[in-house]
Amino acid sequence: MTIDRRAFIRLAAAACASAHLPLANADAQQKPVSLRLTLRPDRLGNKIEDDFTGLSYESAQLANPNFFSGENTSLIAFVKRLGNSGVLRIGGNTSEYCYWKPNSATGANAIVSPDFVAAPDPGHKVPPPANITPQAIRNLRDFIDASGWKLIYGLNMGTGTAEDAAAEAAYVMDVAGPRLIAFQLCNEPDLFYRNGIRRSDYEFPQFAVEWQRFYDAIRARVPNAPFAGPDTAFNTSWLVPFAQKFKSEVKFLSQHYYAEGPPTDPSMTIERLLRPDPKLEEEFEGMKKTARETGLPFRLAETNSCYSAGKAGVSDTFASALWGADLMYRLASQGGAGINFHGGGYGWYTPIAGTPAHGFVARPIYYGMLLFAQAGAGQLIESILDAAEQTPLLTAYALRSTTGDIKAAIFNKSPDRGVQLTANAQGKYASVLRLHAPRIDDTTDVTLGGVPIGSNGNWSPAPEENLTARNDRILLDLPAATAALLTFHN
């Protein structure tokens, strides 16, 4: 007798969830830790808006107008599964080598193979130039219309001219209309000196002069054009002066964050990815400082696990799902307005891998984003883990959703220790949606709600696991290297 592999994964994962046991070797697990989680619906935190979630792709992908198109129904389905109102960001390293070709239907060398996909650019060398045509922008509008998402659009300030940027912005603004939430004038300008785009002494003052010149040229052509910036790679010292100088010209501030890198460094491991990152705390401090001083929202416009296009065995593993979803909640809890996970093609860290011709599949990090989507928008409430310092790889976040439900997302990023968690009940029972894989380094057999994500983003979780409240308490067993979303019901 034969059995379908996906069906087997579904049955095995569902059985594991109901038994509260991981699929990994039980002998390798340490004794579970018992902790208490206290939820305080009366203590409100930051809001998570319905456009918090986002994806980021290289601008060079527009050289193939058939990729972001209303006809790419498979990719549209994967995008919509993450939310009905997310944000697609077009930018990346290749944005500084993409050129607007408005005077013909295609432009020289603009139409490439229908299978062409632009993987995340590692930034090791100058990428080949790519042409962007009116057809690509019209198709892009069809894509975002079909998905219901909004658009952040990157322009070429690195090697382009202000006049060309203004012409491109005028066309994009005319076609994208209200779905365009911001133009970004460049990608990681604080690294221009490293990749030869600018001289080694290029600093914020020179950048500010250039940014103002491009801004003025575009606004002269498109008076209501929206902007964001500075879209720096890491340099928080640029964030405050940019916010102070251009706060009346931008809708929000944007910056990038990568947890690890370079991928050639052997110390860039799963274990390091899942540990608390002081660099992230520094970025959050810069975010909060500018928010206090200017009132501008902050978005991680490009992020993922490991810069220079990711690392095999880390970026493409189940660990990235736990890390990615936790990062989303961490950012929201610190006041961030949204996040865009970079990807494309078959890149190691891309959330959605594939081509229109060969179909698309969900990579592990997509499952973490999907867990976040199942909780949805709402207002965070206080959640307190007793003795949290004893379990630094355990995190918990709670919110009151827009439907009024109390939900709690709990992440056990420890590779070898389970948790028995007692939470004060917010209803008579709680349904449980579990994020799981056989191993933390698994690249394929990931499930959410006991099932994998199918083609075209198809996903229907197994029958709910319910936990009954006893003495106003809910007991959740959370195995090592898993996560769970609790939804409380009366």
Image (cartoon, helix red, strand yellow):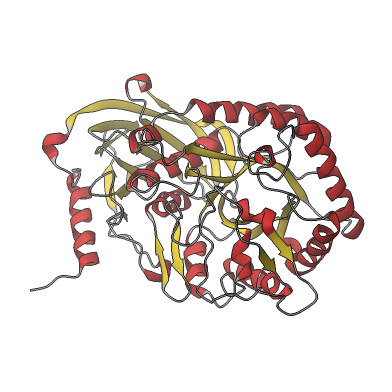
Q: Which residue is outermost to the right?
A: 220
Q: Quadrant of the N terminus?
A: bottom left
Residue 209 or residue 402, whichever sits in front:
209
- Indicate the quadrant where residue 297 lies: top right
State the residue at coordinates (73%, 80%): 105
Would you say 466 lies left or right of 275 here?
A: left
Q: Position of residue 250 (x, y in %)?
A: 78, 44
Q: Which residue is outermost to the bottom?
A: 105
Would you say 398 lies left or right of 44 here?
A: left
Task: Note whether 358 is above or below 19 in the view shown.
Answer: below
Residue 395 or residue 307, whichever sits in front:
307
Task: Note whether 171 is above or below 472 in the view shown.
Answer: below
Q: Which residue is outermost to the left?
A: 1
Residue 355 or residue 402, whichever sits in front:
355
Q: Position of residue 97 (x, y in %)?
A: 68, 57
Would you say 112 lies left or right of 214 here?
A: left
Q: Position of residue 59 (x, y in %)?
A: 63, 59
Q: Position of residue 84 (x, y in %)?
A: 56, 61
Q: How many marks?
A: 0
State the residue at coordinates (84%, 49%): 215
Whether residue 149 is visible = no
Task: Note whether 7 is above or below 323 in the view shown.
Answer: below
- Indicate the quadrant where residue 476 lies: top left
Whether residue 51 is visible = yes
